[in-house]
Image (tube, helix red, strand yellow):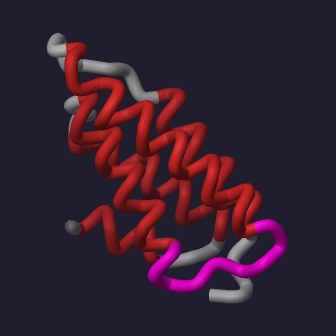
Amino acid sequence: MSDIDSRAFFGAVLKAIACTRNHNPDESGYAEGVLAPTARIREFEKELGDRPLGPAEVDQVLAWLDSTFRTKHTPAEEREHYLRRVAEVTGQARARAAVAA
C-alpha cells in the first residue's frame, strides 16, 4: 500500500463526492450522510500528512465515500465510474474491489 499516491487518492475521492448529484429528495440525512463523512475524509487527509495509507485506512475512506453515495442515492453505474476512477488515479485495486461489492 505504500506505493499509493495519497494526494491523488484523496483528490479522486473528494472529487467523486463533489461531482455526484444528490438524487435523494429527503434533505434531513444530508448533513450526517454526506457532509460529516466528507469532513472526516478531509480531517483524515490532514492528519495523515506524508505518511502512506494502510489497507485499513483505504477501506475506511472508501466506506465514507460509500456513505455519501448511499445518502445521495447515487446510481450503481455512477458509483462504479467513480470507484474505477479512484483506482485508475491512484493505481490501486481496493477501489476496484469496492465496485464489486
Q: Whole-percent x and y of residue 93?
A: 48, 78
Going 61% across and 59% down the picture, which residue do you hit? 44
Q: Whole-percent x and y of residue 59?
A: 42, 72
Quadrant where the C terminus sits is: bottom left
The residue closer to the viewer here, 32 or 90, is 32
Going 41% across and 50% down the picture, which residue do you hit? 65
Above/below status of 47 relative to 23: below
Going 22% across and 26% down the picture, which residue do you hit? 29
What is the residue that sits farthest to the left in this orientation? 26
Most common secondary structure along the magenta stretch:
loop
Extent of the magenta region: 49-57
Q: Whole-percent x and y of residue 48?
A: 71, 68
Above/below status of 91 relative to 83: below
Above/below status of 12 relative to 17: below
> Is 12 positioned to the left or the right of 50 in the image?
left
The residue closer to the viewer here, 3 or 78, is 3
- Is 73 one of the magenta-colored residues? no
- Is 56 one of the magenta-colored residues? yes
> Is 71 positioned to the left or the right of 78 in the image?
left
Above/below status of 33 relative to 31: below
